[in-house]
Amino acid sequence: MTEVATSIREVKLFINGEYVESSDHQQFEVKNPATQEVIAKVHEASYADVDRACRAARQAFEEGPWRTMSVSERCAKVRRMAEIILERKEELARLEALDVGKPYQVAVEREIPRAAENLKFFADFMEKQGGEVYPMDDEFLNYTRYEPVGVAALITPWNLPFMLTTWKLGPCLATGNTAVIKPAEVTPLTVSLLGEIAKEAGIPDGVVNVVHGFGGGSAGEYMTTHPEVDLISFTGETTTGKTIMKSGADSLKKVSFELGGKAANIIFEDANLEKAIPVSIQAAFMNSGQVCLAGSRILVQRTILDEFLERFKAAAAELVVGDPQDPKTNMGPVVSEEHYEKVSSYLDIAKFENATLIYGGKRPELPENLSTGYYLEPTIYLQENPNARICQEEIFGPIVTIIPFDTEEEALAIANGTDYGLNGIIWTESLTRAHRISHHVRAGTIWVNCWFVRDLRAPFGGFKKSGVGREGGHHSLEFFTEAKNICIAL
Ligand code: NAD
């Protein structure tokens, strides 16, 4: 382990441009999931603290200069945030690995740079936006403006804390809104730094506020019911999305929800297994399977089932499970004790449902210093019944289920036989089949012969219970703006 793991940090709230303590002196602890060591004491925002943060955001919005400064000046500051993030890349990646248990290498090479890119992308994209003009005969002229909505509540989960928060913060700021951010209570470390990064980038006080706490009866609920909050951008569980929608209903807040998933990864008999197997391993076990886009249901055509099982199992056995700070590690622990209990309960459920264990299914052998970590082996089941709980419920851990199928129709019925619809993955060398299946899988993103490839201009979001609305490119800008039409008599 590196020295980064040993000190206990004090994490404060960031309100109106400064770090402050919880007004009622409540704190909660955060643990390193690899060791159970306490790594931070976090100030929990009281209602009064959230109220202060929301009022500061309102004042910064109404009184400016953030909302009224030129787009290029505002976007230059957002781009500066991206530069500071890259300058602090190693530190942020160490903290993310420590807090979430994800491999440092993944954080430093992919997630933190992507967080910087999120901010830069939306700053650049915003600067290129135009409006619409509708001339009406010779008498009237209509033109549209896209104006910021106001105070945004940005509520994010623990699996990709920094990356997902910047994915919301980029369009929120570039369009001129102000923000109150709440990271997940189990992983607040990196997101807690966004306020100071914004300040260093020259963003006025009150524009970016960060509060800490839990959901119901705590900071999350205080934000989603607060009268000064105009819109809520939330990423997390489907059940939490339902609760937040109700909380925000009384004050008619605009909502954008990115929720859970249970993607089908369909492997047809003509798939190129040389490519499909390593990518399917990533899709199953990246971030210990704690990815909303995980290919957690692998549908395999029966004619290639034996070969696929053998090769997929061999590839899973190659994964190095261990210390997240070690560059050789491919897979760390799951995020918390509570989540470990949830994920491992599916080992019993799978057994009860007569799934066949192909690989894993227990704690891995690890060195003494990691013996208390929340580790589980990469685990593979074979299950003929697509309605079994392990095929239907979002496990959000390193457990993947292989479901055999015979025909294309059967594969589609299984793929669509779930409440979720975030994404789907298709492996085939047939162009016509690739298009045909892509059109019929009911999900917001379909990857053909690839996974996790993202163009930030493209729409991102879920069908069915995987979300409400879309993020990405102009979809994000639309959510964070109000369109105004101005009609002038000539
Ligand atoms: P979660 O819903 O438990 O928590 C997410 C955030 O919501 C946290 O900050 C939490 O404190 C807050 N929260 C909880 N209850 C709340 C309430 N009543 N009011 C206001 N805020 C509340 O989710 P999680 O366990 O942190 O994350 C895992 C989930 O996130 C999975 O379901 C995963 O699929 C989903 N996810 C989706 C995407 C996507 O883009 N669709 C991306 C990542 C994760």
Image (spheres, grey):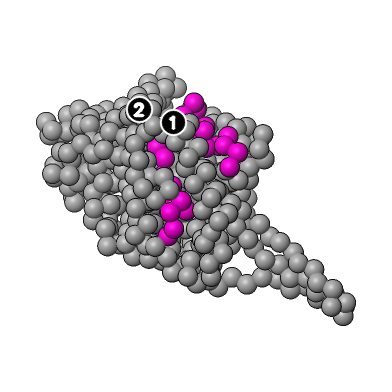
Q: Splitting the image into 4 quarters, where does residue 319 fall?
A: top left
Q: Is residue 252 left or right of residue 318?
A: right
How far is the residue under mark 1 from the one under mark 2?
8 Å
Q: Name the one closer to the observer, 357 or 478.
A: 478
Q: Which residue is mark 1?
A: 46
Q: Residue at x 38, y 45 (%)?
A: 14
Please state which amino acid type lies under the numbered disc 2: Gln
Q: Residue at x 27, y 51 (%)?
A: 93
Whether residue 417 can be seen here = no
Q: Are marks 1 and 2 in contact (CB under 8 Å)?
A: yes
Q: Is residue 462 left or right of residue 106?
A: right
What segment is highlighted magenta in the picture? 203-228
Residue 75 pos. (x, y %): 47, 67
Q: Is residue 62 left or right of residue 348?
A: right
Q: Is residue 300 above or below residue 369?
A: below
Q: Residue at x 52, y 62 (%)?
A: 65
Question: In terms of secondary structure, where does tag 2 sit?
Answer: loop
Please state which amino acid type lies under the numbered disc 1: Ser
Q: Which residue is mark 2?
A: 26
Asked if the magenta segment contains residue 211, the reply would be yes
Residue 373 pos. (x, y %): 22, 31
Does the closest atom of ligand 1 sit within 8 Å of the Cβ of label 2? no
* Within-10-Å neighbours for mark 1: few <14, some 14–19, many 20+: many
